[in-house]
Image (tube, rainbow, N blue to C red):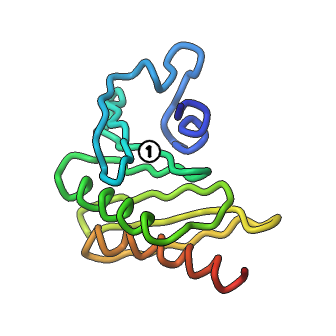
Amino acid sequence: MHSKRMNNLLSGVSLNTDTEPWKSWPHHNVSLGHGIVGTMYQLENYSPTLVWDEGDWTFILPNSLSSTELQAARAMVSYMNVRLLPPSPGVASVQNGVHGSYSSASFMQGKYIIRVSMAGANETNEAVGVLRMAVDWKSDRA
């Protein structure tokens, strides 16, 4: 399900899609609420990475080591249960680091790729914040 999109998403991670497709890496399902199920991949030499799809969007949370990442993912799913993202291919990523979290969303708008991002100290706020910006971007230009 995620193979092609995932291979295109992770720059800097050497992937040999012929010998090591995503679906063969150790993984398990994670319930994110509202009927959405994510897949937690254990990438070789990397931290666990949570991935799920909704419509034409792919969501990826690398370094999903704690309940904080799952809380952010569940908050994103809850937000999307109420609001619709732009109906075009998109990718959203949330990364938590030593100095706070960074969230971004990129999506197609006509012939342009729109990227919105947000950084701060609260991973869940930033995760939902970039989705809110994407929804607002769509609404402002609809």
Please tell me whether residue 10 is drawn above or below residue 17 in the rendered image: below
Q: Residue at x 32, y 23 (%)?
A: 26
Looking at this rendering, what residue extends furthest in the right direction? 111
Residue found at x 17% / y 50%: 66
Q: Please provide percent x and percent y for residue 6.
A: 53, 38
Q: Given the current orientation, which residue lies at the most extreme left position?
A: 67
Residue density around tag 1, few if under 14, some if 14–19, many if 20 or more, within 10 Å:
many
Identified by mark 1, the residue type is Trp
Q: Secondary structure at mark 1?
A: strand
On the image, which quarter does residue 138 sit in? bottom right
Taking the image as shown, residue 83 lies to the left or right of residue 45, namely: right
- Residue 139 lies, with reference to residue 104, above or below; the image says below
Q: Residue furthest top?
A: 19
Q: Is residue 76 left or right of residue 69?
A: right
Along the line of sight, the residue nearer the viewer: 67 or 121:
67
Given residues 39 and 82, the one toward you in this image is 82
- Give coordinates of residue 75: x percent, y percent: 31, 64
Q: Indicate the quadrant containing the C terminus: top left, top right, bottom left or bottom right.
A: bottom right
Which residue in the structure is indicated by mark 1?
A: 52
* Residue 65 percent coordinates (x, y): 21, 46
> Measured from the top left, where is residue 134 in percent x and y?
56, 73
Residue 116 drawn above or below residue 68: below
Q: How many marks?
A: 1
Q: In percent of the image, x 55 and y 55: which residue is there? A: 91
Write down the quadrant of residue 135 in the picture: bottom right
